[in-house]
Amino acid sequence: MFAPTPVETMTFAQREIFVKRDDLIHPDFSGNKARKFQYFLEKECPEITKLVGYGSAQANSLHSLAVLAKMRGWQLDYYVDHIANYLQQNPQGNYLAALDNGANIIEKPEHVTESLDSYVTELANSALDNELYIPEGGRCEYAAIGLEQLGQQILDWMHEKHYSTLNLFLPSGTGTTALFLQRFFKIKRLEHEALPEVNVLTCSCVGGDDYLRLQFNQLSENALHHPRIISNGNKYHFGKLKRECYEMWQRVCASGIEFELLYDPVGFIMLEHFLTQSSTVDNIDNTAPLMYLHQGGVLGNPSMLARYHRKYQAK
Protein backbone atom coordinates (compact mmCIF):
# COMPACT_ATOMS: atom_id res chain seq x y z
CA MET A 1 0.00 0.00 0.00
CA PHE A 2 1.29 3.46 -0.90
CA ALA A 3 1.92 6.01 1.85
CA PRO A 4 -0.63 8.87 1.93
CA THR A 5 0.21 11.60 -0.56
CA PRO A 6 0.30 15.22 0.68
CA VAL A 7 -2.43 17.81 0.33
CA GLU A 8 -1.32 21.34 -0.60
CA THR A 9 -3.20 24.56 -1.25
CA MET A 10 -3.34 26.96 -4.17
CA THR A 11 -5.40 30.00 -5.13
CA PHE A 12 -7.65 29.54 -8.14
CA ALA A 13 -10.70 31.51 -9.30
CA GLN A 14 -10.25 33.73 -6.24
CA ARG A 15 -10.65 30.68 -4.02
CA GLU A 16 -8.31 28.63 -1.91
CA ILE A 17 -8.51 25.05 -3.14
CA PHE A 18 -6.75 21.94 -1.95
CA VAL A 19 -4.59 19.82 -4.25
CA LYS A 20 -4.20 16.12 -3.53
CA ARG A 21 -0.67 15.49 -4.79
CA ASP A 22 -1.12 11.98 -6.14
CA ASP A 23 1.60 12.84 -8.64
CA LEU A 24 4.05 12.31 -5.75
CA ILE A 25 3.23 8.65 -5.04
CA HIS A 26 6.44 7.37 -6.63
CA PRO A 27 9.06 8.96 -8.94
CA ASP A 28 8.21 6.58 -11.78
CA PHE A 29 4.89 5.05 -10.75
CA SER A 30 2.51 7.88 -9.91
CA GLY A 31 -0.93 9.36 -10.28
CA ASN A 32 -4.08 7.56 -11.27
CA LYS A 33 -2.19 4.86 -13.18
CA ALA A 34 -0.31 3.89 -10.03
CA ARG A 35 -3.65 3.60 -8.24
CA LYS A 36 -5.21 1.61 -11.09
CA PHE A 37 -2.27 -0.78 -11.40
CA GLN A 38 -1.62 -1.14 -7.66
CA TYR A 39 -3.48 -4.46 -7.60
CA PHE A 40 -1.04 -5.97 -10.09
CA LEU A 41 1.93 -4.60 -8.15
CA GLU A 42 0.84 -6.30 -4.92
CA LYS A 43 -0.81 -9.51 -6.15
CA GLU A 44 1.21 -12.72 -6.32
CA CYS A 45 1.31 -13.79 -9.99
CA PRO A 46 3.96 -16.53 -10.15
CA GLU A 47 2.81 -17.74 -13.56
CA ILE A 48 2.98 -14.33 -15.27
CA THR A 49 6.06 -13.39 -17.30
CA LYS A 50 4.54 -10.97 -19.81
CA LEU A 51 2.30 -7.92 -19.44
CA VAL A 52 0.31 -6.75 -22.48
CA GLY A 53 -1.28 -3.33 -22.80
CA TYR A 54 -2.29 -0.86 -25.50
CA GLY A 55 -2.99 2.80 -26.12
CA SER A 56 -1.11 5.87 -27.30
CA ALA A 57 2.66 6.00 -27.76
CA GLN A 58 2.71 8.93 -25.33
CA ALA A 59 0.15 7.63 -22.83
CA ASN A 60 0.82 7.83 -19.10
CA SER A 61 -0.25 4.19 -18.92
CA LEU A 62 2.61 3.17 -21.23
CA HIS A 63 5.21 4.53 -18.82
CA SER A 64 3.42 3.18 -15.74
CA LEU A 65 3.00 -0.30 -17.23
CA ALA A 66 6.68 -0.32 -18.22
CA VAL A 67 7.66 0.52 -14.64
CA LEU A 68 5.23 -2.07 -13.27
CA ALA A 69 6.65 -4.75 -15.57
CA LYS A 70 10.20 -3.85 -14.58
CA MET A 71 9.31 -3.96 -10.89
CA ARG A 72 7.77 -7.41 -11.31
CA GLY A 73 10.43 -8.77 -13.65
CA TRP A 74 7.97 -9.11 -16.53
CA GLN A 75 8.24 -8.22 -20.21
CA LEU A 76 5.86 -5.50 -21.44
CA ASP A 77 4.38 -5.70 -24.93
CA TYR A 78 2.50 -2.47 -25.59
CA TYR A 79 0.48 -2.05 -28.79
CA VAL A 80 -0.11 1.32 -30.47
CA ASP A 81 -1.85 2.42 -33.68
CA HIS A 82 1.33 4.12 -34.85
CA ILE A 83 4.45 5.89 -33.66
CA ALA A 84 4.96 9.32 -35.20
CA ASN A 85 8.20 9.73 -37.14
CA TYR A 86 9.09 12.78 -35.06
CA LEU A 87 8.75 10.76 -31.86
CA GLN A 88 10.80 7.88 -33.24
CA GLN A 89 13.57 10.27 -34.23
CA ASN A 90 13.29 12.34 -31.04
CA PRO A 91 12.25 9.94 -28.24
CA GLN A 92 10.91 11.85 -25.25
CA GLY A 93 8.30 11.85 -22.49
CA ASN A 94 6.41 8.69 -21.67
CA TYR A 95 7.62 6.99 -24.85
CA LEU A 96 11.28 7.46 -23.96
CA ALA A 97 10.71 6.52 -20.30
CA ALA A 98 8.96 3.32 -21.35
CA LEU A 99 11.81 2.38 -23.70
CA ASP A 100 14.30 3.07 -20.91
CA ASN A 101 12.34 0.67 -18.71
CA GLY A 102 12.49 -2.11 -21.29
CA ALA A 103 9.07 -1.80 -22.94
CA ASN A 104 8.49 -3.51 -26.28
CA ILE A 105 6.33 -0.99 -28.18
CA ILE A 106 4.57 -2.59 -31.14
CA GLU A 107 2.74 -0.80 -33.95
CA LYS A 108 -0.49 -2.40 -35.14
CA PRO A 109 0.24 -4.19 -38.45
CA GLU A 110 -0.66 -2.12 -41.50
CA HIS A 111 -2.89 -4.85 -42.93
CA VAL A 112 -5.12 -4.82 -39.84
CA THR A 113 -8.18 -2.65 -40.51
CA GLU A 114 -9.98 -3.15 -37.19
CA SER A 115 -9.51 -0.80 -34.26
CA LEU A 116 -6.58 -1.16 -31.90
CA ASP A 117 -9.00 -2.08 -29.10
CA SER A 118 -10.56 -4.89 -31.17
CA TYR A 119 -7.16 -6.11 -32.36
CA VAL A 120 -5.72 -6.40 -28.87
CA THR A 121 -8.97 -7.91 -27.53
CA GLU A 122 -8.59 -10.69 -30.09
CA LEU A 123 -5.03 -11.25 -28.94
CA ALA A 124 -6.24 -11.38 -25.33
CA ASN A 125 -8.82 -14.04 -26.21
CA SER A 126 -6.00 -16.37 -27.24
CA ALA A 127 -3.59 -15.32 -24.48
CA LEU A 128 -1.11 -17.81 -23.08
CA ASP A 129 -1.14 -18.67 -19.38
CA ASN A 130 1.94 -16.53 -18.79
CA GLU A 131 0.39 -13.38 -20.30
CA LEU A 132 -1.58 -10.73 -18.42
CA TYR A 133 -3.66 -8.33 -20.52
CA ILE A 134 -4.58 -4.89 -19.14
CA PRO A 135 -7.46 -2.87 -20.68
CA GLU A 136 -6.56 0.54 -22.09
CA GLY A 137 -5.81 3.00 -19.29
CA GLY A 138 -6.45 0.37 -16.61
CA ARG A 139 -10.22 0.46 -17.16
CA CYS A 140 -11.16 -2.64 -15.16
CA GLU A 141 -12.58 -3.61 -11.78
CA TYR A 142 -9.09 -4.33 -10.44
CA ALA A 143 -8.47 -0.57 -10.55
CA ALA A 144 -10.91 -0.14 -7.66
CA ILE A 145 -8.43 -1.61 -5.17
CA GLY A 146 -5.94 1.24 -5.32
CA LEU A 147 -8.59 3.91 -5.84
CA GLU A 148 -10.47 2.87 -2.73
CA GLN A 149 -7.26 3.30 -0.75
CA LEU A 150 -7.00 6.80 -2.21
CA GLY A 151 -10.61 7.44 -1.18
CA GLN A 152 -9.85 6.37 2.37
CA GLN A 153 -6.88 8.73 2.47
CA ILE A 154 -9.20 11.59 1.52
CA LEU A 155 -11.72 10.64 4.23
CA ASP A 156 -8.92 10.45 6.80
CA TRP A 157 -7.73 13.91 5.76
CA MET A 158 -11.26 15.31 6.06
CA HIS A 159 -11.59 13.83 9.55
CA GLU A 160 -8.29 15.39 10.56
CA LYS A 161 -9.35 18.80 9.21
CA HIS A 162 -12.93 18.50 10.57
CA TYR A 163 -14.60 18.88 7.17
CA SER A 164 -18.11 17.44 6.88
CA THR A 165 -18.40 17.92 3.11
CA LEU A 166 -16.02 18.18 0.17
CA ASN A 167 -16.23 18.62 -3.59
CA LEU A 168 -13.54 16.45 -5.19
CA PHE A 169 -12.74 17.42 -8.78
CA LEU A 170 -10.69 15.59 -11.40
CA PRO A 171 -10.70 15.63 -15.23
CA SER A 172 -11.60 12.32 -16.90
CA GLY A 173 -10.65 10.22 -19.88
CA THR A 174 -12.56 6.95 -19.49
CA GLY A 175 -13.92 8.13 -16.14
CA THR A 176 -12.66 5.04 -14.31
CA THR A 177 -10.94 6.94 -11.50
CA ALA A 178 -13.86 9.32 -10.93
CA LEU A 179 -16.49 6.58 -10.91
CA PHE A 180 -14.67 4.20 -8.58
CA LEU A 181 -14.02 7.07 -6.17
CA GLN A 182 -17.68 8.15 -6.22
CA ARG A 183 -18.80 4.55 -5.73
CA PHE A 184 -16.45 4.17 -2.77
CA PHE A 185 -17.70 7.35 -1.07
CA LYS A 186 -21.37 6.49 -1.64
CA ILE A 187 -21.02 2.93 -0.30
CA LYS A 188 -19.03 4.06 2.73
CA ARG A 189 -21.64 6.69 3.61
CA LEU A 190 -24.49 4.17 3.27
CA GLU A 191 -22.63 1.95 5.72
CA HIS A 192 -21.80 4.83 8.10
CA GLU A 193 -24.11 7.85 7.84
CA ALA A 194 -21.86 9.88 10.13
CA LEU A 195 -19.04 9.89 7.59
CA PRO A 196 -18.31 13.11 5.66
CA GLU A 197 -20.03 13.64 2.29
CA VAL A 198 -17.80 13.73 -0.78
CA ASN A 199 -19.20 14.80 -4.15
CA VAL A 200 -17.01 13.71 -7.05
CA LEU A 201 -17.08 16.19 -9.92
CA THR A 202 -15.44 15.63 -13.29
CA CYS A 203 -15.35 16.78 -16.89
CA SER A 204 -14.83 15.03 -20.19
CA CYS A 205 -11.44 15.35 -21.89
CA VAL A 206 -11.98 12.54 -24.41
CA GLY A 207 -15.02 12.15 -26.64
CA GLY A 208 -17.47 14.51 -24.95
CA ASP A 209 -19.98 14.19 -22.13
CA ASP A 210 -22.14 11.53 -23.83
CA TYR A 211 -19.06 9.33 -24.28
CA LEU A 212 -18.20 9.77 -20.61
CA ARG A 213 -21.72 8.84 -19.52
CA LEU A 214 -21.48 5.69 -21.65
CA GLN A 215 -18.23 4.77 -19.90
CA PHE A 216 -19.88 5.30 -16.52
CA ASN A 217 -22.78 3.02 -17.45
CA GLN A 218 -20.44 0.28 -18.62
CA LEU A 219 -18.62 0.38 -15.28
CA SER A 220 -21.75 0.68 -13.12
CA GLU A 221 -25.43 0.91 -14.01
CA ASN A 222 -26.17 2.43 -10.59
CA ALA A 223 -26.61 6.15 -11.21
CA LEU A 224 -25.68 6.90 -7.59
CA HIS A 225 -22.13 5.78 -8.47
CA HIS A 226 -21.86 8.23 -11.37
CA PRO A 227 -19.85 11.41 -10.71
CA ARG A 228 -21.34 14.79 -11.62
CA ILE A 229 -20.13 15.99 -15.02
CA ILE A 230 -19.53 19.73 -15.22
CA SER A 231 -19.19 21.61 -18.50
CA ASN A 232 -19.02 25.11 -19.93
CA GLY A 233 -20.70 23.90 -23.12
CA ASN A 234 -17.49 23.52 -25.13
CA LYS A 235 -16.09 20.19 -26.33
CA TYR A 236 -12.34 19.66 -26.19
CA HIS A 237 -10.86 17.06 -28.52
CA PHE A 238 -8.23 14.93 -26.83
CA GLY A 239 -4.70 16.01 -27.66
CA LYS A 240 -5.80 18.94 -29.85
CA LEU A 241 -3.73 22.04 -29.14
CA LYS A 242 -5.67 25.10 -28.03
CA ARG A 243 -4.09 28.34 -26.95
CA GLU A 244 -6.56 28.74 -24.06
CA CYS A 245 -5.42 25.37 -22.68
CA TYR A 246 -1.78 26.41 -22.80
CA GLU A 247 -2.59 29.73 -21.15
CA MET A 248 -4.58 27.99 -18.40
CA TRP A 249 -1.67 25.59 -17.84
CA GLN A 250 0.67 28.55 -17.41
CA ARG A 251 -1.72 30.14 -14.91
CA VAL A 252 -2.05 27.08 -12.66
CA CYS A 253 1.64 26.19 -12.84
CA ALA A 254 2.40 29.68 -11.53
CA SER A 255 1.06 28.35 -8.21
CA GLY A 256 4.32 26.43 -7.83
CA ILE A 257 2.73 23.06 -8.66
CA GLU A 258 3.43 21.63 -12.11
CA PHE A 259 0.35 20.17 -13.78
CA GLU A 260 0.22 18.16 -16.97
CA LEU A 261 -0.78 19.55 -20.36
CA LEU A 262 -3.41 17.12 -21.66
CA TYR A 263 -6.11 16.78 -19.02
CA ASP A 264 -5.39 19.44 -16.40
CA PRO A 265 -5.89 22.54 -18.59
CA VAL A 266 -9.34 21.34 -19.65
CA GLY A 267 -10.04 20.39 -16.05
CA PHE A 268 -9.20 23.85 -14.73
CA ILE A 269 -11.15 25.58 -17.52
CA MET A 270 -14.26 23.60 -16.54
CA LEU A 271 -13.57 24.01 -12.84
CA GLU A 272 -13.30 27.80 -13.19
CA HIS A 273 -16.68 27.82 -14.95
CA PHE A 274 -18.18 25.80 -12.09
CA LEU A 275 -16.70 27.95 -9.33
CA THR A 276 -17.82 31.24 -10.87
CA GLN A 277 -21.47 30.24 -11.34
CA SER A 278 -24.25 30.78 -8.81
CA SER A 279 -23.62 29.10 -5.46
CA THR A 280 -25.58 25.95 -6.34
CA VAL A 281 -24.98 24.12 -9.63
CA ASP A 282 -27.05 20.98 -10.26
CA ASN A 283 -27.70 20.71 -6.51
CA ILE A 284 -23.97 20.88 -5.73
CA ASP A 285 -22.85 23.74 -3.50
CA ASN A 286 -19.86 25.28 -5.24
CA THR A 287 -18.91 27.23 -2.11
CA ALA A 288 -18.07 24.00 -0.27
CA PRO A 289 -14.38 23.13 0.28
CA LEU A 290 -12.88 21.85 -2.97
CA MET A 291 -10.03 19.44 -3.62
CA TYR A 292 -8.37 18.99 -7.01
CA LEU A 293 -6.91 15.54 -7.59
CA HIS A 294 -3.51 15.81 -9.26
CA GLN A 295 -3.25 12.56 -11.22
CA GLY A 296 0.34 12.88 -12.40
CA GLY A 297 1.33 12.72 -16.05
CA VAL A 298 3.84 15.58 -16.08
CA LEU A 299 6.43 13.37 -17.79
CA GLY A 300 4.52 13.98 -21.02
CA ASN A 301 4.86 17.76 -20.75
CA PRO A 302 8.11 18.16 -22.75
CA SER A 303 6.60 16.56 -25.85
CA MET A 304 3.38 18.57 -25.48
CA LEU A 305 5.37 21.79 -25.02
CA ALA A 306 7.32 20.98 -28.18
CA ARG A 307 4.03 20.60 -30.08
CA TYR A 308 2.76 23.93 -28.73
CA HIS A 309 6.01 25.60 -29.72
CA ARG A 310 5.88 24.19 -33.25
CA LYS A 311 2.27 25.35 -33.69
CA TYR A 312 2.44 28.80 -32.10
CA GLN A 313 6.06 29.86 -32.45
CA ALA A 314 5.22 32.14 -35.41
CA LYS A 315 2.23 33.73 -33.66
Image (tube, grey):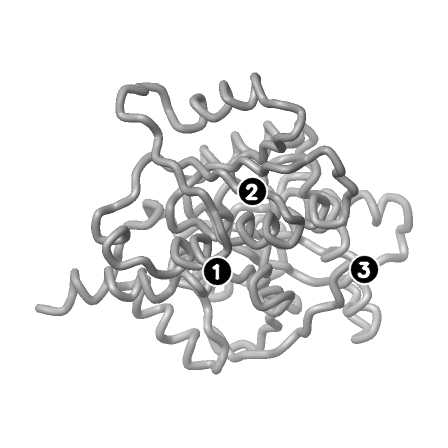
Residue 153 spot, x, y in % from top left? 77, 63
Does the rendering let one see residue 271?
A: yes
Marks 3/1: CA–CA distance: 29 Å
**Mark carried by residue 297:** 1
In the rendered structure, the answer to whether residue 72 lies left or right of residue 187 reads left
Whether 2 is drawn above or below 6: the answer is: above
Q: Nearer the viewer, mark 3 or mark 1?
A: 1
**Mark carried by residue 64:** none
Which of the two labelled residues, at mark 1 and mark 2, occupies the earlier sequence position?
A: 2
Q: Residue furthest left?
A: 314
Name the amino acid type tagged 2: Gln
Circles 1 and 2: CB atoms closer than 8 Å = no
Residue located 63% across and 35% down the image: 140
Quarter of the image with the C terminus is: bottom left
Quarter of the image with the N terminus is: bottom right
Q: Secondary structure at mark 3?
A: loop
What residue is disc 3 on? 196
Q: Nearer the viewer, mark 1 or mark 2?
A: 2
In the rendered structure, the answer to whether residue 206 lies left or right of residue 41 reads left
| Label 3, residues with CA under 10 Å away: few <14, some 14-19, many ≥20 | some
Name the amino acid type tagged 1: Gly
Marks 1/2: CA–CA distance: 22 Å
